[in-house]
Image (cartoon, rainbow, N blue to C red):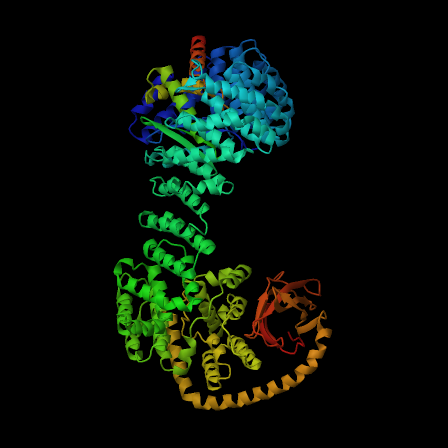
Amino acid sequence: MPSLQSSEIRYILVQNRQGKTRLSRWYFPCSDEEKNKLLSDFYKLVNVRDPKLANFIEYRTYKIVYRRYAGLFFGMCVDTTDNELAALESIHLFVESLDAYFGNVCELDIVFHFWKCYALMDEMFLTGEIQETSKKIVLKRMSDLDRLN
Amino acid sequence: MSMQVRDLIKAVRGCKTAQKIREVITRESALIRNSFRKEDKINRPRNIYKLIYIHMLGFPSEFGQLECLKLIANPSYIGKRIGYLGLSILVTENQEVLFMSTNIIRNDLSSEDRYVVGLALAALGNIGSPEMLRDLAPEIEKLMESESSYLKKKATLVAIRTIRLVPESVDRFIGKVRTLIGEKNHGVVLTGLQLVLSIVKTEPETIVKFRKLVPGLVRMLKSLVNAGYSSEYDFRGTADPFLQYNILRLLRYLGEGSKKSSKLMADILTQVGTSGGISKNVEIAILYEAVSTILSIESDSKLRVTAINTLSRFLSGRHNNSKYVALNTLLKAVNTEPKSLKRHRKVIVECLKDKDISIRRRALDLVFGIMDKKNVESLTQELLDCLPKAEKEFRYDITAKICTAIEKFSPNDKWQIDTLIKVLTIGGQYIRDDVSSMMTSVIGRNPDLQYYTSKKLFNILLDDRYRNQTFLQVSSWVIGEYGDILMQKSEKDGELINTTQALDLFQILLESSRTTDETKYYILTALIKFSTRIEGYDELIKKIIKPYREHVNVELQQRACEFFLLFDYNEIRDPILDRMPIFVEKEIELEIEEEVSENINKGENNDIQKNTQIIQNQINVNQNIQTVQNTQNTGINELLMLNTETKKTQPQNKQDSLNFLQEIFSGSGSRSNNNNNNMNNNNNNNNNKTGGQGLGLDLGLGLGLGLGMNNQSQRQNQMQTQRQTQQNQMQNQRQTQQNQRQINQNQNQNKNQNQSQNKSQNQNQNQQKVQNQPFVVYEKNGIKIEMNFKVGNIRGTPAVMSIIKTTNISSIPISNYLLQVAVPKTLKAQLSQPSGQTIPPNGNGLVNQQLQIIKLVQQKTQLSILLRVTYVINGQKIVENKEVSNIPIFF
């Protein structure tokens, strides 16, 4: 399978400080072993990092952009040529949307409603690209979907 | 009855150990499996949710994949929603399941319910394989024209995935771009821009076509920038930043290589790239994107300078993220905008002190990037200032950069020495090896600075703060090598340095527990050199060396033993420890690259500098003489290295130097009397000091025979040393007898020499004939080595080029074939790698090698070569030496 070299985002991860993965979306074909390796590497890299340092880590031939929100690390792996600052913004947009959707989101919301989080993620990102950047539209879509349930 | 998803999560969270979790999951998995088997439709959605959770915890979940298919085949929206989610998380590699899902997805893509279509598109976007996307491309294309912007966005993104995985499908989507970008809905425009980006990445030729979009994009950007606030797409006070990033990014692709397009976007880029604050990440991200675009496209110099200035503003800001991206971008601009970059030197240097290693590393690269002859001194000082606080790996990087800076921009040798000394003292252990080699070579070629350097090193050595091993090694080498200069001149200058002090210092260092054995090798060598440089301290030096004859470290022990013995051979001690020849760095580097460098570096911790490699080679040659075992590994490399000595030699008796070459080989050929042979020849040369300089070569006797022998057990080594001592004693007794014999030998040699000189005139006439004619130099066991010679020039130096062809006309294949070449000291030979190591029988193949011989002296020289052929035939190893001195070539 050809690699998704030019994909903006290779994967999006949400992990807590203990290294438990709360959400993960993979935009490139990848085996479970490989995923586990990437997950544990992400934890090792991010967890020990001094919060004052830059939010970017070079990892293999890519770059991990992450930000910590309370006890959760939100991270995405992007191409080295991508705009790291913009990636950071999109993480923030995702977190803000989660926050608005759940109303002051906490880790437990994500644990118990993981499918809703995935749905929200799929409304914002798809195939490694940003799909929608308006929080308002995303939230409206989510409430539409919820009503269908 | 299986539990609710909620309860499962609670149960898992309630577990205190991993073992407990495993139990809960195993039990639940069994129940789920059971329920699947029973085709329990009611619980299916719930089970899939649970499986997704189980999958997230890292437990097996494959058995649920088919159930996901069943769910998506179900007409209900809720079932589909769960099924597609399960599909996109649980199934990523299973091609079969994906294949089976293709038809269901196709149906859903044409569903009337747009939410169902949305689900199918999302699944395609997340897990669509090339086959699926190829199959469904027409449907995707159609959906891109859907009336619903919701579906349009999703379909466009799936199109991007299709282009990535099925590049040939790109044509299908190019035509859609214009309408997408012309939409009012920002989300659609955004995906449209991303589509163009992926098209131009896949198919760069399309850029020319898309340049038509530039005016529209510029207008769009302008309205965004001037809009200020838009309720729907405002994000942290900026109007749709994501759309801005993407427009700027696309402009970069379109502007590159096109002056016309670049000009069209110049105004808006100036506006975006200069205005705007740098307090918020959103703003910085836009500035950063704009600046990157300005630097990539064909902007005028004024705009570029503004871009660099903006980046410099990032550097002086507080945000590490913006520093990081600014340094990254500046690094890209270092070649195109050196002048304006240099203006921001101060902020860049400041980043060297940042907490974040990735920022420091980039700053270091950048500092190096803006370095030139003018600012090298101040910038190197800045780098040196960073050294003490830097962590190990970063120290290594810094010293590496300083070395390169010296190589490229060093204003003078004194500065170079001062800088290197600073690196050695501050950098400590974690510095590049080059530092020491550069140091020794620069001292070697600067007689004026030898006193200065050795004095400086000596004074620093007295201060025990800087006694790191590398520094100790370099300084003991320098002080040992130039001890005489140091002592004589410091006496004249009234400096408080004297030999006793130096020896005391060496003794203290030798006894210190902080000194590693490796460093002690250097100190011992320095001591023995002292004995030849300064008279009257032999006894003291002997006293210091003596205890190390019984040292537990074999190498150290051996050195001590040999050095100690050298005191009994005053005639050879001086030439052995003669001053190192001036070191010509480039040549040796070249040879190391060309020849098998592993030989040199393997196991030898002694490479304090390339200069000492000469010593090593001598040592290796010595090993050659001593042991046949090592002949395979050492060999040609070292032999060639011998000739790299560029020390001015007195015109030499050729026969004598060939004689010397013969020594090397003859010694290695016979093991039994190798030691005697060696000493024998040394004496021989000393007794007939015809070309005394030649001596510097073959000895090395003392300089650490042990190198490369570390693999042997200590005991063996001790025995060997003992044996040597005995042999030497025996030899002493026989010396008179041998001297007699040598005189005879030499008389014979002289005769030979006269004869060959007579011959040479005739040979000179034959020279032209021989050129281009193969010359058989060896023929035995069916092996025939032919050489043809051609006289010419290499970089202005007279040289002989030769192609050596080896064939095998016997019926037995030859393996492990190795040809080694040695030439007199007045010449320098370089042999290329052979084309093979085996030669097939019956003349069915040949080994080719090229030989270059350069002349190092002015005089006309006759070519003479010593060959050593090594090969294995019939399982028998044959080593043979052959002197080729009758080649009628003079150059």
Q: Quadrant of residue B802?
A: bottom right
The percent position of residue B599, horizontal first and vertical second, equals: 49, 63
Q: Nearer the viewer, residue B348 or B536?
A: B348
User: What residue occupies the far front of the structure in this picture?
Assistant: B302
Q: Is residue B760 visible?
A: yes
| The quarter of the displayed image where residue B413 is located | bottom left
Return the x and y of residue B138 as percentages of the image width and height.
Answer: 63, 19
Image location (x, y in percent) of residue B435: 40, 58
Report the residue at 36% width, 27% height from top: B279
Height in image: B43 above or below B387?
above
The residue shown at (56%, 18%) is B181
Residue B209, x across and y down, in percent: 64, 26
Whether residue B708 can be seen here: no
Q: Is residue B368 left or right of residue B654?
A: left
Q: Is residue B51 left or right of residue B180?
A: left
- Taking B129 as reference, is B568 above or below it? below
Front one among A142 and B60: A142
Q: Quarter of the image for the N terminus of chain B: give it.
A: top left
Q: How many marks?
A: 0
Q: Quadrant of the C terminus of chain B?
A: bottom right
Residue depicted at x 54% and y 74%: B825
Return the residue nearer the eye: B56 or B290. Answer: B290
